[in-house]
């Protein structure tokens, strides 16, 4: 099948690569000329495990190409995926300007029947507006389908190749069958392809992300209360996780969720509620708890140092919003570091993949260390913010030779408090005794 993917970011690049991997001819389009020029040279703009191999293989076999020429890509393709960004506006609503700009451009470029597929996360009712935007530009036949994406950054290729389910929101049989055929190679082990109406598909994506965000905020509240009442959140979590009605995922307390999806999508769903006169009360609390969680972490640091951290030096491990990605969009590390800098602290940082992104955000305001150990040179404390695998089992004796004070603030509960105390560290976790 000939496919165009418009918007070559975290989602578009993975989707384009994986569709090519299953034999389709894919052209990925972006209006960022520098990104496209780099991709044409084989330079991948993001860190995503397994992605470089997929891109390289399919470019070599001439199933995957990159262009800024949207009209040519539209003309060549039967199915056109929209995977441009839908960031948050100041009111909390999704900014759909890129989606509608692309929809109009598709309408102008069409030369025969097309299936236009919304893969970007968009509020309920958007696909109908996309249809209107295209209809304004053409009299040719087309269908608009909603196909929300559920991949996780850090395991995006794996998730795309083996999805738990594929959701196709279509109001007609023909485009639904085209999408079913396209996804058939990815669901051979029996994952369902759920064919639903367009509005339900749009809603499903927001419901999924909001539910996961709610689990995290719920667990953070339980952890905060554990601290106050003297209970141990690790055991509470294990007890919850082993309940088959609850399950183990998204129950780890920490410094709050971040990334380009959970904060944005919970807010957009609340805004959809407001637009329809319905208050999403649970999500209001989920968002508020999350906003406070990173500040609570900073408050704990300040409390340890008797509310005076001016001139104190902190080594921060982890900038990315989660491990196995270089993405720092809405990362808790940004809020934490900004608050520490505002209080006069000196910061060194280290992240295995997000240093370039960190330099773009912090410039010369923080020191970028060459390794996680170098980051602790003269540090008054370590702040563990992202639970990269490489941080899980460090050489604590070596760390002691570099640190000025032996204090660890473990924002992800990855270390054994007992062990660290025996080694002479002062240890703070989240909700641990
Ligand atoms: P991204 O910012 O990484 O990528 C978006 C791309 O679209 C960029 O390369 C940008 O240059 C391009 N673009 C913007 N306007 C354009 C235009 N007019 N023409 C052509 N290209 C244009 O975003 P992302 O993380 O890939 O997310 C894309 C969408 O998918 C969002 O709606 C997001 O909510 C959703 N989503 C993201 C994830 C995720 O894990 N990142 C998962 C599921 C769904």
Image (tube, grey):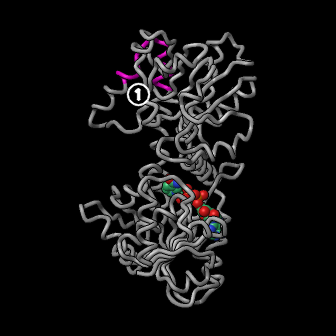
* Residue 82 point in image, percent of width and height: 54, 69
Question: Where is 231 relative to 90, above or below?
Answer: above
Question: Where is 413 relative to 129, above or below?
Answer: above
The image quadrant that residue 37 belongs to is bottom right
**Mark 1 beta carbon near ligand 1 (under 8 Å):** no
* Residue 236 point in image, percent of width and height: 36, 23
* Residue 241 point in image, percent of width and height: 32, 32
Question: Residue at image x 54%, y 28%?
Answer: 373
Question: Where is 226 relative to 21, above or below?
Answer: above
Task: Give the position of the N terminus as an image quadrant.
Answer: bottom left
The span picked out in magenta is: 221-236
Question: Residue at image x 60%, y 79%?
Answer: 106
Task: Give the position of the C terminus as an image quadrant.
Answer: top left
Question: Which residue of the protein is positioned furthest toward the left in this rendering?
Answer: 189
Question: What residue is shown with label 1?
Answer: 393
| Ligand 1 occupies quarter | bottom right
Could you tell whether 143 is left or right of 31 in the image?
Answer: left
Q: Residues within 10 Å of mark 1 (few under 14, many from 20)?
A: few
Question: Residue at image x 33%, y 75%?
Answer: 181
Q: Secondary structure at mark 1?
A: loop
Inspect the magenta stretch and tell me whether residue 209 lies in it. no
């Amino acid at each position: 099948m000939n496919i165009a993917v418009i918007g070559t970011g975290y989602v578009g690049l993975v989707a384009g690569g994986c569709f090519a991997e299953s034999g389709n001819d894919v052209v990925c389009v972006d209006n960022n000329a520098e990104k496209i020029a780099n991709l044409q040279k084989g330079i991948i703009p993001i860190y995503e495990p397994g992605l470089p191999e997929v891109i390289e293989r399919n470019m070599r076999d001439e199933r995957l190409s990159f262009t800024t020429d949207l009209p040519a890509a539209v003309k060549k393709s039967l199915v056109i995926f929209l995977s441009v960004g839908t960031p948050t506006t100041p009111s909390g609503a999704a900014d759909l300007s890129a989606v509608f700009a692309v929809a109009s451009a598709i309408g102008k470029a069409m030369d025969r029947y097309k299936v236009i597929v919304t893969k970007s996360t968009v509020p309920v009712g958007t696909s109908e507006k996309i249809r209107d935007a295209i209809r304004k530009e053409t009299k040719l036949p087309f269908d608009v389908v909603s196909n929300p994406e559920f991949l996780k950054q850090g395991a995006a290729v794996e998730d795309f190749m083996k999805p738990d389910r594929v959701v196709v929101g279509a109001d007609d049989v023909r485009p639904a069958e085209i999408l079913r055929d396209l996804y058939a190679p990815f669901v051979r082990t029996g994952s369902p392809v759920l064919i639903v109406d367009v509005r339900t598909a749009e809603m499903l994506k927001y419901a999924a992300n909001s539910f996961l965000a709610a689990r995290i905020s719920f667990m953070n509240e339980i952890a905060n209360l554990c601290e106050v009442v003297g209970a141990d959140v690790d055991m509470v979590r294990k007890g919850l996780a082993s309940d088959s009605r609850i399950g183990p995922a998204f129950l780890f307390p920490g410094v709050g969720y971040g990334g380009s999806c959970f904060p944005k999508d919970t807010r957009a769903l609340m805004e959809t509620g407001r637009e329809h006169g319905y208050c999403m009360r649970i999500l209001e609390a989920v968002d508020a708890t999350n906003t406070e969680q990173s500040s609570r972490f900073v408050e704990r640091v300040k409390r340890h140092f008797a509310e005076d951290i001016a001139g104190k030096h902190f080594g921060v491990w982890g900038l990315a919003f989660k491990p196995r990605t270089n993405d720092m969009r809405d990362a808790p590390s940004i809020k934490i570091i900004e608050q520490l800098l505002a209080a006069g602290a000196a910061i060194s940082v280290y992240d295995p993949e997000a240093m370039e992104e960190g330099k773009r955000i912090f410039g010369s305001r923080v020191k970028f260390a060459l390794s996680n150990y170098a980051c602790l040179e003269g540090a008054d404390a370590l702040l563990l913010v992202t639970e990269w695998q490489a941080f899980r089992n460090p050489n604590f004796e070596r760390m002691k030779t570099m640190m000025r004070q032996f204090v660890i603030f473990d924002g992800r509960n990855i270390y054994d408090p007992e062990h660290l105390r025996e080694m002479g560290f002062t240890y703070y976790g989240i909700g641990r005794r």
